[in-house]
Amino acid sequence: MKINWFKYAAPTAFYPVAGRLVPVFGFAALALVLFALYWGFFETPERLGGTNPQKEYYRIIFIHVPSAWMSMWLYLVLAAWSAVGLVFNTRLSFMMANAVAPTGAIFTFLALWTGAFWGRPSWGTYWDWDPRLTSELILFFLYIGFMALHSAIDDSRRADRAAALLAIVGLVMLPIIYWSINCPDPNNCAALHQRSSLTDIESNILTAMLVMTLGFWLYSFAAAFARLRNIILLREQDNAWVRKMVDAAEGTSPRGAAGVGGRPANRGVSV
Amino acid sequence: MQGLIGFLSQGGYAFYVWSAFGMTFALLIAEMLVLRRSRRTILQRVGRLARLRTQNVPPGEQS
């Protein structure tokens, strides 16, 4: 079977597909997050030994690391859709970028917030101008800047292109964040933030962390698709298919039936 | 009951643990509610505009 993917590059064609995907991703995300919460709180040790002993507050790892990963991953997705939009000039790509941005900003904020509440008991401070923390904060400002720039320009096609350019320039932050905890000599650098190594993590903790990451990821799909549908509706509201769909939806709901024009008017041929 | 209190206190780090988890799920739930509300608002607006158009297109046919 051959699927014509370009068919779904049209907002008209993708709108119903996104509508079917939202609950699928949403409920899958809910199941994974609940499982990860259960596993993280009840199947993991209360404290961690080793050279850097951690007490119960280490459980913040189950949301801190997934949020931080999602903040970077969603930025990559945002920049990728922006690039696709600029190269192929496809409306849906820009809409995708816009749909991802607020969710990415939320996860970036959460990475900073949960990090602060982990930093206080373990480092003794909520905030420090550590390279990792600072670069993540700049990523947060990039998300905000993307959304602000887009909404500051009235012409949506221009707004798309300007914001897309900003998103691509901002890509420079991803490697900076990634390598911000590295320095040639660990004794000689100011970085507070721990290095991470997936192979060193106790297997139950790793399980809860990875399942939570998957849950956040699926949640991002659901939220982005739901927002995409709103964006499509707003931008295509003058097109016949949106009007027809809204008419059909209102014809079956009491609100539409009681509308000013009544049912016959709603059924009227739109010419 | 003892178990529940022990769980909630998180070994004395309740403030940090629940602040982090609370903000996370508050924001995710808030995002879903905002998305649903804005969808309703958009649909209402589009529906209103559509009704205005269908009323205006065939003049004199109403009432």
Image: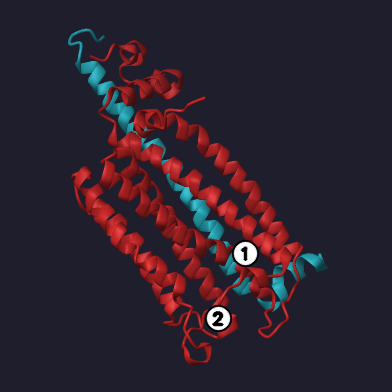
Q: Quadrant of residue A141?
A: bottom left
Residue at 71% x, 68% y is B8
According to the picture, the residue beneath numbered tag 2 turns out to be A120
For label 2, the SS is helix
Query: Which residue in the structure is indicated by mark 1?
Result: A62
Q: Is residue A136 visible?
A: no
Q: Name the residue type under label 2.
A: Arg
Tell whether B7 sits left or right of A82.
right
**Amino acid at pointer 1:** Phe
Q: Is residue B13 left or right of residue A149?
A: right
Q: Nearer the viewer, residue A171 or A255?
A: A171
Write down which chain is painted cyan: B
Q: Tag 1, which secondary structure?
A: helix
Snapshot quadrant of residue B5: bottom right
Against A90, residue A38 (above or below) is below
> Looking at this view, is A50 or A124 the one in front?
A50
Residue, x 69% and y 66% (percent of image)? Answer: A205
- When the figure is inspected, residue A47 is found, relative to residue A149, above or below; the finding is below
> Where does the C terminus of chain A fall, quadrant-wise?
top left
User: In the figure, is residue A165 to the left or right of A244?
Assistant: left
- Percent from the top left, x then y, of residue B19? 57, 68
Residue A189 spot, x, y in % from top left: 47, 88
Does label 1 lie on the same chain as label 2? Answer: yes
Task: Identify the hue of chain A.
Answer: red
Q: Residues within 10 Å of mark 1 (few under 14, many from 20)?
A: many
B63, B37: nearer the viewer: B37
Chain to which mark 1 belongs:
A
- Tell me residue A234's x, y (percent): 31, 37
Q: Is residue A215 above or below residue A267?
A: below
Q: In terms of image quadrants, where is residue A92?
A: top left
